[in-house]
Image: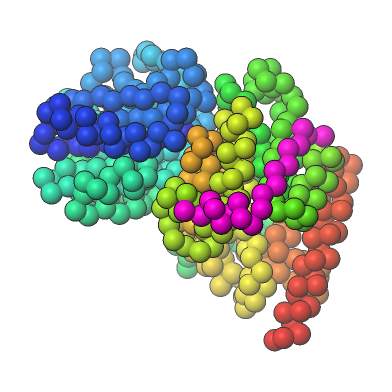
């Protein structure tokens, strides 16, 4: 993952314009401290700040097809790139970088290739043969992306607002799951899962093993790396499952052959915080090399200005959650780790927030999960992406895997409903999917402690209602 900046059709191909675009691109250098690239074709500029994770030696960007008529600058990870290369036997690739497939897929399939990509991405592709371009963003908006328009009619694309806001008369969030084509001069949605129609209530029966297998696949595919990595482990259900699956399957991966099968886990909190204790307990159970970072309230207050600058939001909840993540990311990066796996997205998919216990029926429960997922790019995805990238650290989020979401959102929401009389607390179906007596994923204390705390909260809420 990286930082991208593109200026298309700016009616200025002067050296002064190139210098200005380099200046703006440097505002994104925190996202990609490993290398910088800028390619100019007439009045089109594609800039890139690289965080090298796959093929660090030769995967610098922008990327090209064989004759360099197709140019791509991309921020992302394409997890199925090896399978896609096999579908392109007549193409010659310049690098082993996972994103190298994009230009070649466009050559082969035109603008309709985006749904073939399994991963997270934001990219700009320039076709110099007719001077057209396309821009696309991943399904849920795990990667950040913005679009703006200059007074001269130019189109600006950047991973963060700070790369384009000074130059545009209008700018906005580039919508997740969409593609913008210069030929049509409009957005169109390339990601159209059934759950986007909130009126359609799914009816697939719950199968714990199907859900478990889907999540394990989502985690395993994210172990694609040529650099050291770790997991964020707060001791809650979501991060603990991410760590448990990673620890279980790491040994058989290419990553383990390069960096060893011992998983590193990271946790942050104030002194005496329950997250530190819970994280340590899960880490001990899983046998990870665990790292705890403590910060003070003053540390958090002192960081707020920087957190706002990097996350580019004043949303109170986002800033509050981003601050410890921002502080922890700096510590993690200083240890030599370049990316981490995190647990964002589970609460939105499974109705993990406490207010979901008030859902009157399965229809409204499902519709609320749909709305929460659609809004993730403005909140949790934005926080996870920008608070880690502030220090050149990448966060990967398996709960937001496209295939896993399909499996989880196809389940009849009746199985997700919170029913206290049946002992079903929030995310019950996720807990049950990984409740393996013979080969446990997590310590029993995690389930029992969380259940006890949640029941106490529910009793308090019921008392006052």
Which region is colored magenta? 287-305
At a point 57% along the width and 38% down the height, the residue shown is 330
Work out whether residue 190 can be spotted: no
The x and y percentages for residue 43 are 14, 31
Residue 302 in percent (x, y) is at 54, 53
**Image quadrant where residue 250 sits:** top right
Q: Is residue 59 above or below residue 438?
A: above
x, y percent for residue 347: 62, 58
Question: Which residue is drawn at the image coordinates 84% and 59% (left, top)?
Answer: 449
- Taking the magenta stretch, the answer to whether it contains residue 295 is yes
Q: Is residue 287 left or right of residue 304?
A: right
Q: Residue at x 56, y 57 (%)?
A: 301
Image location of residue 127, percent across then percent down: 22, 28
Q: Nearer the viewer, residue 18 or 140?
A: 18
Residue 305 in view in this figure? yes
Is 61 or 23 nearer to us in this picture?
23
| 422 and 244: which is toward the camera | 244
In what quadrant of the picture does the C terminus appear? bottom right
Q: Would residue 300 appear left or right of 287 to someone viewing this image? A: left
């Amino acid at each position: 993952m990286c930082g991208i900046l593109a200026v298309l059709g700016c009616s200025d191909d002067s050296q002064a314009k190139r210098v200005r675009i380099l200046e703006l691109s440097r505002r994104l250098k925190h996202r990609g401290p490993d290398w910088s690239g800028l390619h100019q074709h007439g009045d089109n500029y594609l800039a890139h700040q690289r965080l090298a994770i796959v093929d660090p030696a030769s995967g610098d960007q922008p990327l090209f097809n064989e004759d360099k008529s197709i140019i791509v600058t991309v921020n992302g990870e394409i997890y199925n790139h090896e399978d896609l290369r096999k579908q392109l036997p007549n193409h010659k690739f310049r690098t082993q970088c996972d994103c190298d497939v994009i230009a070649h897929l466009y050559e082969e399939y035109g603008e309709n290739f985006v749904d073939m990509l399994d991963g997270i991405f934001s990219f700009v592709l320039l076709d110099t043969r007719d001077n057209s371009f396309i821009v696309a963003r991943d399904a849920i908006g795990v990667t950040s992306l913005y679009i703006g328009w200059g007074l001269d009619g130019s189109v600006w694309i950047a991973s963060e607002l700070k790369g384009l806001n000074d130059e545009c008369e209008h700018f906005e969030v580039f919508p997740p799951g969409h593609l913008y084509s210069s030929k049509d001069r409009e957005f169109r949605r390339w990601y159209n899962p059934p759950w986007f129609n909130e009126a359609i209530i799914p009816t697939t029966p719950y199968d714990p093993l199907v859900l478990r297998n889907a999540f394990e696949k989502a985690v395993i595919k994210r172990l694609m790396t040529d650099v050291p990595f770790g997991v964020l482990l707060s001791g809650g259900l979501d991060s603990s499952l991410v760590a448990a699956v990673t620890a279980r399957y790491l040994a058989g991966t290419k990553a383990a052959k390069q960096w060893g099968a011992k998983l590193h886990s990271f946790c942050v909190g104030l002194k005496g915080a329950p997250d530190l204790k819970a994280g340590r307990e899960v880490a001990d159970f899983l046998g990870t090399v665990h790292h705890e970072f403590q910060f003070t309230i003053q540390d958090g207050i002192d960081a707020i200005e920087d957190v706002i600058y990097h996350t580019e939001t004043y949303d109170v909840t986002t800033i509050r959650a981003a601050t410890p993540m921002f502080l922890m990311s700096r510590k993690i990066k200083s240890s030599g780790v370049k990316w981490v796996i995190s647990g964002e997205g589970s609460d939105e998919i499974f109705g993990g927030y406490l207010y979901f216990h008030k859902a009157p029926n399965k229809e409204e429960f499902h519709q609320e999960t749909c709305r929460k997922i659609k809004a993730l790019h403005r909140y949790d995805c934005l926080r996870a992406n920008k608070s880690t990238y502030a220090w050149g650290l990448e966060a990967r989020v398996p709960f937001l895997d496209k295939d896993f979401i399909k499996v989880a959102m196809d389940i009849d929401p009746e199985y997700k409903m919170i029913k206290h009389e049946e002992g079903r607390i929030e995310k019950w179906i996720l807990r049950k999917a990984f409740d393996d007596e013979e080969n446990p994923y997590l310590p029993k204390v995690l389930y029992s402690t969380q259940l006890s705390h949640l029941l106490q909260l529910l009793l308090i809420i019921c008392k006052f209602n």
